[in-house]
Structures are given as structure tokens and as C-alpha cells.
Amino acid sequence: MSVLGDLQRMGHEEVVIVQEPTSGYRAIIAVHSTRLGPATGGTRFWPYATMDEAMTDVLRLSRGMTYKNAVAGLALGGGKAVIIGDPHMSAGREALFLAHGRAVNRLQGRFITAEDVGTRPADFEIAARETPYVAGFGGRGGDPSPWTALGVVRGIEAAAAYRWGSSDLTGKHVVVQGCGNVGGAVALHLRERGAVLTVSDTEGARAAACAAAVQGRVVEPAMVYDVEADIFAPCAMGAILNDDTIPRLRVEVVAGAANNQLLRPDHADAVAARRILYVPDYVINAGGVISGSVALLGETPERMAQRVHDIHDTVRLVLELADRNGVNPAAAADQLAESRLQQREE
Ligand code: NAD
């Protein structure tokens, strides 16, 4: 793999590889873009098998953050960090996150980070002893999940209006995959709006509790793609829209919180070919990153909440753009992000 070639193609501003032999800290920090503001994105802690794998992930994820923040209308750029190691480690974790704090601090505010897969708020309280450029823990951000869930529901309403001419979800049957922090809250919001729920989780007890809370039913995780319903809301893991699952879907709309739902970009065409309306993941799940604007940009909580509600309008805009430009919604979202970045440059 040619890292410099990838950097040029994807347009990264700066990529830092850091190693601290005393603590065992090994990380890559990728600043994709600071055009709209400081590069902001989570720190992923993962046992990557090779350095190439870690590099591919951080380059892709950091660019994704640029696009997500641009479409959300935030004055934030895109970045990401990956720490290579065992995310379950406890001995030596403090030294690791102090080292991470120092590495982040050397970028002098060009990169601001918070939790992601494998990291938790306590890690950033440790890192905060070395740098002010961390967020996502008590007093500096807090739990983004409720805001992500609210944004997802506003996006579902926009998709319903686009497909059926009304955002009213009364009687609409929604299948929610994953009853975690976001999926569980999405199911509750939908129930409040009169939707009928089918839920699924690999943790059986969690699925049962969620179904009870929303008077819904439970479906086995393996069968979730086969349920005949109006809307499928993926709120668990990525790559669930693929060659196996797309032909099985019996819904009209796919709209949920999970990141990287498409296994490959062309799977968005495969979904469209089945006349299923796909709401791009990074557009509809931006509520969490938007909630960080209070701590990061000094926005009022009221303005932040309004921005989360406005995900409704952003989803509608993306769906309209897709139709107008004859592209799938994922490509339309990328076009919108690129035009916002371009405008800023001019
Ligand atoms: P979570 O870990 O709280 O919940 C995920 C749930 O999915 C768990 O209950 C887990 O048991 C379940 N699950 C895993 N594999 C499953 C499968 N095959 N079938 C059914 N259920 C399965 O995570 P979360 O914070 O709710 O995030 C959910 C998704 O939303 C993730 O993809 C995450 O990246 C994305 N997301 C979350 C936020 C946020 O604010 N938390 C923001 C943006 C995107």
C-alpha cells in the first residue's frame, strides 16, 4: 500500500504516527480537514492485525468525519485517531491514555477527540490531564446517544414524508436492529409516535426488555432482514447492507443509526434498484456529534437541540438532491458535503 498515494487521493492534511515504547502506546492520528474548523472525531482502540489495516481504517474514518460534520452544518473539520492494542486492557491503561493526551496536545487544537469503539469516557478524563483537546465525558460533552436517537427519529420522519407524503408514523411498522443505547431510545421515540415495533438484539434479555417497553415483538437476529415492515432501522453494527441482505429486505425505507451500513459504496445502488429508500448513515446519525457543539463550539443547548431537530430537513435535502441529480442518496450526501467544503474554500 502506498500511504502517500492514499493521502493525496483522499486529501488528508496531516497524518501522525506516534509510538511511546515505555507505555506501549502506538497510535495513528489522521487530520483529514480543518477547512471548516478543528478536525474532530473519536479515538478507536482496536487490535489491528497490521499497521496497514490501522492506517486504512483511520484514513477512511477521518474523511468520513469531515463529510459528516460538513453535512451537519457544524464549524468542525474531520479527524480520527486509532490506538493499536487490546481495548479490554486495564493494567497500563492510564499510562496509555496519558500518552494519547500528549500526542493529541502536540497538534495544538488542530484535532479534538472523544470516545469511539473500544474507548470510554474515563479514558478521556485521563487524557484531559495532558490536553484540553478532548471531550465526551462528564462536564465536557456527556452521553451523545440520546441526541443520536432523536436525530434518527427526525430523519425517519423525513424519510416517511418523502416516501408516503406524511411524516406521521402512526401504525408504521419499524424493525429496529440493536437495542443498545441508541436503538433502545429510537424504539421508545417511535412507540411514542404511534409506530408498531419489532426489535432484535444478540443479547436476548436486552431485546426482550426493549420489546416489553414498546409493546413490540422480538425477532431472532438472523431473521431481522426478512421481516415484512415499512422501515428497517439498523442500530447495531456496520456492513449490514450487502449482497446477502439487500435481496432479502421487505421494507420500503432503511434509516438507522449504525455507522458504515453499506458494505461497499455500490450497495447503495443495489438498495435503490429495489426501490428502497436509503437514508445515508452519517446524515441521520449526526445527533451525537452535533450534541458536542455545546462543549466544542460554545453553542447554547437550545441551538444545539434545534440543530438535531433539523436533521429532518437535511435528510429531506439529501433525498431531493439524489432524485434531482440522478444518484443514490449516499452519493448525494457526499456531493452535499463536498459542495459545503468547496464553498468554504472560495
Ligand atoms: P451499543 O453498543 O449501546 O448498542 C449496540 C447493540 O447492538 C447492543 O445491544 C448489541 O448487543 C446489539 N447487537 C450487536 N450485534 C447485533 C446483531 N447482529 N443483531 C442485533 N443486535 C446486535 O451501541 P450504540 O451506541 O447504541 O450504537 C449503535 C450504532 O450506532 C453503532 O453502529 C454506532 O457506531 C452507531 N452510532 C452511535 C452513536 C452514539 O451516539 N452512540 C452515534 C453515531 C452512530
Image (cartoon, helix red, strand yellow):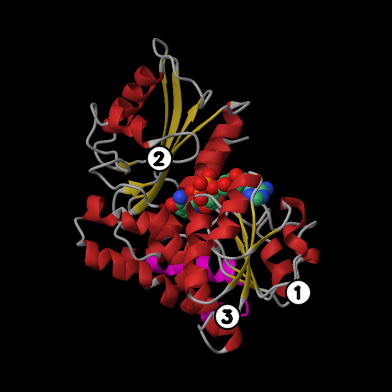
Is residue 290 visible to us here? Answer: yes
Q: Is residue 332 above or below residue 265?
A: below
Query: Tag 2: Cα neighbours inside 10 Å, few (<14), some, or many (≥20)?
Result: many
Residue type at mark 2 is: Glu
Q: CA distance from mark 2 to mark 1?
A: 36 Å
Residue closest to the eye, 253 or 336: 253
Residue 325's tag is 3
Residue type at mark 1 is: Arg
Regarding mark 3 in the picture, which secondary structure is present there?
helix
Regarding mark 2 in the picture, which secondary structure is present there?
loop
Residue found at x 42% / y 77%: 313
Give the mark nearer the N terminus: 2 vs 3: 2
Residue 85 in the figure: left or right of residue 273: left
Residue type at mark 3 is: Asn
Is residue 64 visible to us here? Answer: no
Residue 274's tag is 1
Q: Is residue 32 above or below residue 94?
A: below
In this figure, which residue is indicated by the disc labeled 2? Answer: 115
Range drawn in magenta: 318-340
